[in-house]
Image (cartoon, rainbow, N blue to C red):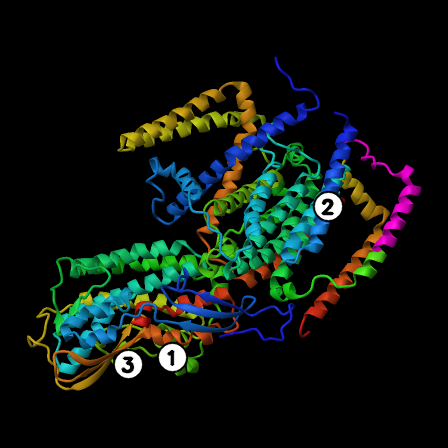
Amino acid sequence: MPFSFPPSIEPFVLPALYIVILVAVFPLIAGYIVLLERKVMADIQVRLGPMRVGPHGLLQPIADAVKLLIKEDIIPAKADRMVFWLAPVISVVTALVALSLVPFSKYFFVADTNVGLLFLLSITSVGILGIILGGWSSNSHYPLLGALRSTAQLVSYEVALGFALIGGLMVAGTLSMQQMVHAQLEQQMWFIFYQPVAFVIYFIAALAETNRTPFDMPEAESEIVAGYHTEYSGFRFALYFLAEYANMVVVSSIAVTLFLGGWLRPFPNVRLLDFLNYAPILAMFVLAFFVFLGASRERRPIDKMGLAGLGAVCALIGLLFLVPAVLDWVQGLFWFVLKVFLVLYTFIWIRFTVPRYRYDQLMRIGWRWLIPLAMANVIVTAIVMILF
Amino acid sequence: MIETSPTSTFLDANELVINMGPQHPSTHGVLRVILKLDGEKILGTECVIGYLHRGVEKIAENRTYMQFAPYVDRMDYVAAVSNGLGYCEAVEKLMAIEVPPRAKYVRTVLTELNRITSHLLWLGTHALDIGAITPLFYCFREREEILKIFENYCGARLTTHAFRIGGLQYETYNGFEEQVRAVCDTFPGRLDEYEMLLTNNRIWLERTKSVGILKADEAIDFGVTGPVLRASGVKWDIRKAMPYAAYEEMDFDIPTGENGDTYDRYLVRMEEMRQSLRIARQGVDRLPAGPIIGKVPKVIKPPVGEVYHSIEAPKGELGYYIVSDGSTQPYRVRVRPPSFVNLQALDRMVRGLLIADVVAVIGTIDIVLGEVDR
Amino acid sequence: MPESILNGLFFYVLAVVILGGAIMTITRRNAVHSAIWLVVTLMGVAGLYLHLNAEFLAAVQILVYIGGIMVLFLFVIMLVNLDEAAKQRQFNRQWSLALICTLVVLVEFGFFLMRGAGSFAFAEPGQGALKPNTELMAVALFQDYLLPFEIASLLLLVAILGAVLMAKKEI
């Protein structure tokens, strides 16, 4: 390298770069998760979903973002202006900070501290403040009710979530997110097989923590309009939205890291399956193939060109992956993102299949079932670990 | 209306008074419910209606009998066919016009199909209120098939104005019977599909069982009719009790519930859709030939007198009370809308429950504000 | 850049944040604003822990105090009638007595600070930059001081039961 950083700064350069990438790229990814959600929803509900902006609605997230950004900024007359301004910022900052602790791959992570998971939990727990303050500062009844609901919900499900994670942590023996993945590599087993109960509890609690159906009480639109962000519009609303999807990604990432083998490919120790290492290349080419197929079916020339261009980009990326060094770097990221998206897909799937619980029922499930079950799981795990 | 007492200190948590509606997503239109809450618990409610008041009954006094017929479609706009049937039959009763059998059968078939569309809309929105988003789209898919029959028959999908005083305006179109049979064939499978999504769904059960209980005697006291009454265990259906149109010759059951809770009302309506299919199929199978309109004078001028005629609309008893002074315009028309009467039971049903139950109960009463406010 | 200056800088910035937050907490009229400033103070304390390489403690500080206790504080504040509280007088009028007490305490502090000036230094961070102090903490709590730990938790349990008993209208 012709140019190198002084040693005192050097360890901060790569993380800083990653932070910039995350902060810059994540809103875009969140936008496309929304598109994915709408497309999956449409598929479940026998319709097409967004189709107008760009081929197959591919530019819809950008149109949505632009719309939100240029909307009039409304602050209710009797709102607490400072707190109203602060609340979405708290939400989005905590959500993005939490992303910094996620190990996307062996190489791609911002920080790996030895209390990683604990720190992640504590950061997300601060995010609750954004919801409460947002609901309170609007000075309106529905947001206040939403805020009260979410506070009670998040605080109680955090307990179950924590206990479920402890089950996984006992097997992993570390709080560091990277070490967890390595532990699964060494023990040659994804922890979901050691801790199925913990995973189920974690998954349910995660649904509640991210306010997803069937636990979307804080923003149940048919009951309390939009819950804590009823009075928010435009950019501030976009911030809440972004925080919500960032939180979804974070909880899915924790699930993937602790229970589903993180950035490891399936069966990393089986030599016979080494060909799976080339899956990213294959995936890109298959993607390119389908995009080209779609392009040939488009009627409008601009859509045709757009899709063809996208296909070409996919094919080029596939070609780039043929370089061993690039493939090695992308390998873990590919599997990690794939797993995270599978978890996200499950979230979405559940959302459009089941009705919503009532507030008191939600509490009952949390306190009467999940927490005792999670505690029992921890105790049983401890006993088994001591005996064997 | 509700004030905090002057002696309250800052540690007294206020009773919260919130407005649900008129622009609330799940009050099914422009109903406004003032809720008095302790936390999320309902201490009391007060319905404010009239946001959709158009003075339909007053309009009737300034229109001829024929001219008024399209207006009734705009009351319960999701069951326009039923509204039209009730009005036409009331005027026919007043003038003692005999309706030919073919017209009666077509009326019965269309009304029952309309009952299904109304129940489908109820099911979709009710499930949506409780948080299940997807059934709505399935319901609209099936509703579309039935609306196509209406469109083919009379050119309109929603406010159909399908019937005329004395019979029908139009003969059925080619393929009417086949299209109705096709709906009768496919629809039971679709109903099973909805039931698969909801009936045994744990969350659905928890949200609807023992929610908004209305006991049989209370229901009678409130004057509640239709599926809400039948779910409380009262077997009262005007189609059987005071048969009109061609219902006397039809073979169908009246489903009833036991507990009078939201879940029972759901089951009753689901079963009613099946029974409606039975009636519709019998109707097209036995469709007699003959004229479609009876002997109706050119100018409709009923004799002096008054008449009350009620039918079983999808939402309950829909009654028309018409007073004639012998002119071409009614002296007074009074409509007994089922939604308006059923809505009175809301307060009884939601007291002591939570906000989430209010939307469930409003959904289960199945109101249409066009009818409540008229 | 010398490490010690950086350390000192961190310390003083955090100290200003903590003290400033604390002052703002007690002077705000609006209880929610007070709570927000208290959050800032607690964040500063967590920063101090982090500064001393006690990252476990820092994480727990945020998790328990901000994520748990402050959230519940806000929950309660939102439930009570704030308008009544805002009308009440925030400070009492016994300025003179308060001033005397504060002066006495200040003099006391000043005296001891002068006497023991030599022993005040920045606490040394724990040995080894990122030693896993989670384990150390666990060993301390669950092995070395198991009995006191259990007694403390029992005390807390009793307190919780008492609170529930007092809050419940009928048992």
Q: Quadrant of residue A64?
A: top left
Tell me where the magenta segment starts and ends, as one range: C102-131
> Label 1, on which residue?
B234
Position of residue A65 in the picture relative to residue A271 (left or right): left
Check chain identity for marks 3 and 2: say if they share one.
no
Q: Chain of mark 2?
A: C
Q: Which mark is residue B267?
A: none
In this rendering, the label closer to the viewer, 3 or 2? 2
Q: Amino acid at mark 3?
A: Ala
Depth order, front residue of B158/C88: C88
Q: Residue furthest left?
A: B298
SS at circle 1: loop
Q: Chain of mark 3?
A: B
SS at circle 3: helix
Q: Residue shown at 59%/35% (left/top)?
A: A262
Check chain identity for marks 3 and 1: say if they share one.
yes
SS at circle 2: helix
Circles 3 and 1: CB distance less than 8 Å?
no
Residue A249 is situated, as x and y percent measured from the top left of the image, at: 54, 41
Q: Which mark is residue B241?
A: 3
A99 lies above or below A10: below
